[in-house]
Amino acid sequence: AFNKPYYFLAKFSLNRSYEDLATYWGTTAAGGVRFGGLGLGLGVAYNSYTKDQNEAYLPVMFDIRYTFYYPLVRPYLYVNPGYSFRKNRDGFMYAAGVGASLKLNEYISGIVELGYYWQEFHYDVTPDHTIIGNNDFFVMNIGVMLF
């Protein structure tokens, strides 16, 4: 199953804010091509990183991962640099962490990840005044990866 030249993943995230210690949720879908253990792809996400669900972020990111090959459980490292879109609050984002995939059958693996997520935001208070800030999160993801 791991010799296929492509992958697709879908995951659900719980995100703990370093600033206000609140927990938020998100989802991600990504896919790409594989060159041995190296995976390169693109992804999109929905992140509810504010208390008002109407202020969710929509990041578009690169999905870069390296998988270490073991028989049943395969650990990996991942990096997701990208840009998050939100009306009047867009900005760069970066996620990185470690994960493991557990082979369920020839085409599906369960995944578990622990990581860090950084989100920059530009908040337009008035046309002449913009606040630039960032948010930091500890992230726990669960999901599936298709091969």
Image: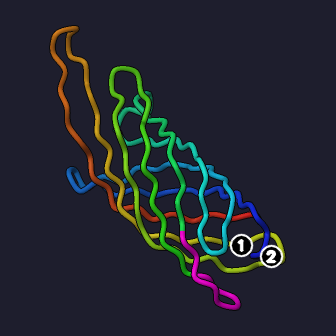
The image shows residue 102, relative to residue 16, as above or below, that is: below
The image shows residue 60, relative to residue 115, as above or below, that is: above
Say which quadrant the N terminus sits in. bottom right
The image shows residue 37, relative to residue 89, as above or below, that is: below
| Side of 78 where 108 appears, left or right | right
| Side of 91 where 100 appears, left or right | right
| Magenta-colored stretch includes residue 73 | yes
Q: Residue furthest top?
A: 127
Task: Determine which quarter of the picture holds residue 123.
Answer: top left
Residue 53's x, y, as percent?
43, 33
CA–CA distance in space, label 2 to label 1: 10 Å
The residue that appears at 66% across and 67% down in the rendered structure is 35
The numbered mark at residue 52 is: none
Q: Which residues are magenta?
A: 66-74
Say which quadrant the C terminus sits in. bottom right
Nearest the viewer among 85 and 27 is 85
The numbered mark at residue 109 is: 1
Q: Residues within 10 Å of mark 1 (few under 14, many from 20)?
A: many
Q: Nearer the N terminus, badge 2 or badge 1?
A: 2
Residue 127's x, y, as percent?
22, 8
Dot 2 corresponds to which residue?
1
Disc 2, SS: loop
Colour mode of the rendering: rainbow
Residue 28's x, y, as percent?
57, 50
Residue 3's x, y, as percent?
78, 75
Disc 1, SS: strand
Q: Residue furthest right?
A: 106
For the residue marked with disc 1, what is the amino acid? Ser
The residue that appears at 34% across and 62% down in the rendered structure is 138
